[in-house]
């Protein structure tokens, strides 16, 4: 079985190492050797400490991906173009494809799936979501007989590290980001992680599999963690919660449809996701018959991601050897993806208020006008330091944000200090 590897950086280098180290076992598991036919890179001159000769390297990724003697193309370059064109060409040339490219799948997944189906080949991408953690195959295969209600995930290690440090040391966002950068957990330009783009791509891919519905990056509501303050973390702690950056995909409880979103949220410390620290990832799945499941592990890094790539490679190689394809795209349910305003959630709202009688009544009336019920109220401080912390019951996001707009207009409210969603069950 001849493999073309496109990209040989952090992930690709470890794919080469694993193919070499486990060659004998892989041969036994697949039933034939996995032979690395060529490796496409951008810089031929770069010294790479890898167990392969220089003759396998090329800068012609397109040529390699479509070569007659290649069976499977593994893409670990990243980005939309030229990866999209290479993979479409490879699929149309009858190659099976394994990729770790979340950005590409979340934007052009349908086109790639269609090309794979039309050519009777596989498109596998376990490494694209949550690195080493087996998540996509369980959703696609193990849970194929069940009905998934909800997927709640910590799928970005950088933001989880930052929020963990803020929670455990009391650091502010900037300080925690600096520490993440120093330790190599944040990129020089961390915006894809901090602003939630990386998690949103993973949420789209996960939702598609969980709900048998095409979901793209544009369907995902997204808020980053840049506005989370030390005060928010302290407030969460005071009510037995912690703040996590969550990717959430869920079925609407009342109308046919799914909501897919990425944002920081308070979750109870008793929730299994609350204990997921530093750069670790975890995904919590709720299915009707299976109940609650949790998948935990390393969501990034060369060798964990390469492990997921190799798992796909073995599966795809076995399929090819037996002359069949694995399960393809399943989008038959075709559920509408609901706008954020129709998503049902809860809010934690911190208000700076005047220290007068009647404040509580005015605030409660604003909630009542939007038909949002209050679960709890806590009053702190006096005079200029007076504040109210309210937690709502569930309501649509539209009603909750309209309530916040009303609160901003009230004379008794000096400022809406913070608003954060609350997820993960009763407090
Ligand atoms: N890193 C992780 O922890 C991780 C985790 C999960 C998923 N992923 C995904 O895995 C993919 C690869 O990530 P990575 O971290 O391994 O990236 P990386 O270290 O930047 O490696 C990218 C590789 O692609 C090659 N390349 C770039 N442009 C090319 C071109 N035009 N033609 C041929 N080769 C080209 C580069 O060549 P040179 O070596 O010559 O520069 C390099 O070998 C991405 O889709 C990423 O989202 C990464």
Image (cartoon, rainbow, N blue to C red):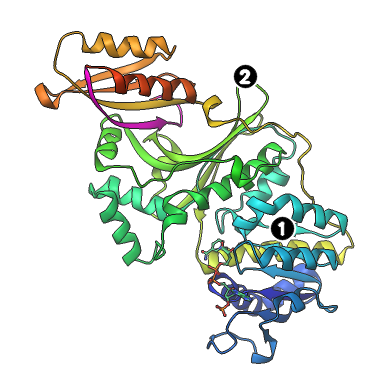
Q: Is residue 423 magenta?
A: yes
**Distance CA(mark 1)–CA(mark 2):** 33 Å
Q: Nearer the viewer, residue 166 or 90?
A: 90
Q: Which residues are magenta?
A: 412-426
**Residue located beneath label 1 in the image:** 124
Q: Nearer the viewer, residue 327 or 416?
A: 416
User: At which x and y percent is residue 265?
Assistant: 41, 36
Quarter residue 191 falls in? bottom left
Secondary structure of the magenta portion, mostly? Answer: strand
Answer yes or no: is residue 34 visible. no
Of tags 1 and 2, the one toward the viewer is 2
User: At which x and y percent is residue 141?
Assistant: 73, 46
Residue under the point 64% across and 45% down: 216
Quadrant location, the C terminus: top left
Q: Is residue 71 above or below residue 326?
A: below
Q: Residues within 10 Å of mark 1 (few under 14, many from 20)?
A: many
Dots 1, 2 in contact, CB < 8 A: no
Quadrant location, the N terminus: bottom right
Q: Is residue 17 above or below residue 333?
A: below
Q: Is residue 405 magenta?
A: no
User: At which x and y percent is residue 126?
Assistant: 65, 56
**Residue located beneath label 2 in the image:** 254
Quarter residue 418 falls in? top left
Label 1 element class: strand
Label 2 element class: loop
Q: Residues within 10 Å of mark 2 (few under 14, many from 20)?
A: few
């Amino acid at each position: 079985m001849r493999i073309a590897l496109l990209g040989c950086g952090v992930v690709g280098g470890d794919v080469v190492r694993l193919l070499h180290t486990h060659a004998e076992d892989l041969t036994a598991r697949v039933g034939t050797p996995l032979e690395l036919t060529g490796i496409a890179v951008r810089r031929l001159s770069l010294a790479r400490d890898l167990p392969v000769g220089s003759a396998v390297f090329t800068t012609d990724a397109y040529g390699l991906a479509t070569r007659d003697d290649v069976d499977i193309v593994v893409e670990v370059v990243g980005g939309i173009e030229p990866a999209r064109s290479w993979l479409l060409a490879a699929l149309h040339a009858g190659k099976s494809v394994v990729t770790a490219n979340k950005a590409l799948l979340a934007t052009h997944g349908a086109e790639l799936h269609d090309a794979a189906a039309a050519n009777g080949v596989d498109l596998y991408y376990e490494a694209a979501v949550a690195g080493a953690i087996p998540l996509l195959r369980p959703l696609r295969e193990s849970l194929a007989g069940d009905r998934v209600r909800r997927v709640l995930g910590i799928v970005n290690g950088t933001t989880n590290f930052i929020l963990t440090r803020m929670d455990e040391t009391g650091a502010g966002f900037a300080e925690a980001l600096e520490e993440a950068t120093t330790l190599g957990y944040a990129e020089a330009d961390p915006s894809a992680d901090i602003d939630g783009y990386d998690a949103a791509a993973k949420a789209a891919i996960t939702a598609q599999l969980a709900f048998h519905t095409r979901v793209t990056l544009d369907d995902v509501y997204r808020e980053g963690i840049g506005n989370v303050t030390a005060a928010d973390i302290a407030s969460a702690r005071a009510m037995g919660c912690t703040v996590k950056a969550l990717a959430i995909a869920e079925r609407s409880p009342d109308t046919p449809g799914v909501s897919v979103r990425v944002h920081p949220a308070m979750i109870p410390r008793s929730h299994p996701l609350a204990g997921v620290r530093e750069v670790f990832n975890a995904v919590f799945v709720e299915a009707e018959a299976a109940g609650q499941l949790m998948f935990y592990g390393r969501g990034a890094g060369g060798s964990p991601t390469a492990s997921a790539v190799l798992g796909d490679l073995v599966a795809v190689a076995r399929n090819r050897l037996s002359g069949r394809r694995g399960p393809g795209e399943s989008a038959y349910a075709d559920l509408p993806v609901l706008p954020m305003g129709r998503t049902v959630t809860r809010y934690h709202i911190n208000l700076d208020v005047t220290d007068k009688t009647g404040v509580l009544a005015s605030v409660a009336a604003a909630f009542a006008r939007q038909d949002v019920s209050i679960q709890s109220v806590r009053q702190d401080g006096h005079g200029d330091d007076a504040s109210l912390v309210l937690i709502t019951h569930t309501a649509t996001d539209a009603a909750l944000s309209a309530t916040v707009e009303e609160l901003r207009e009230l004379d008794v409210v000096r400022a809406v200090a913070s608003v954060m969603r609350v997820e993960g069950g009763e407090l």
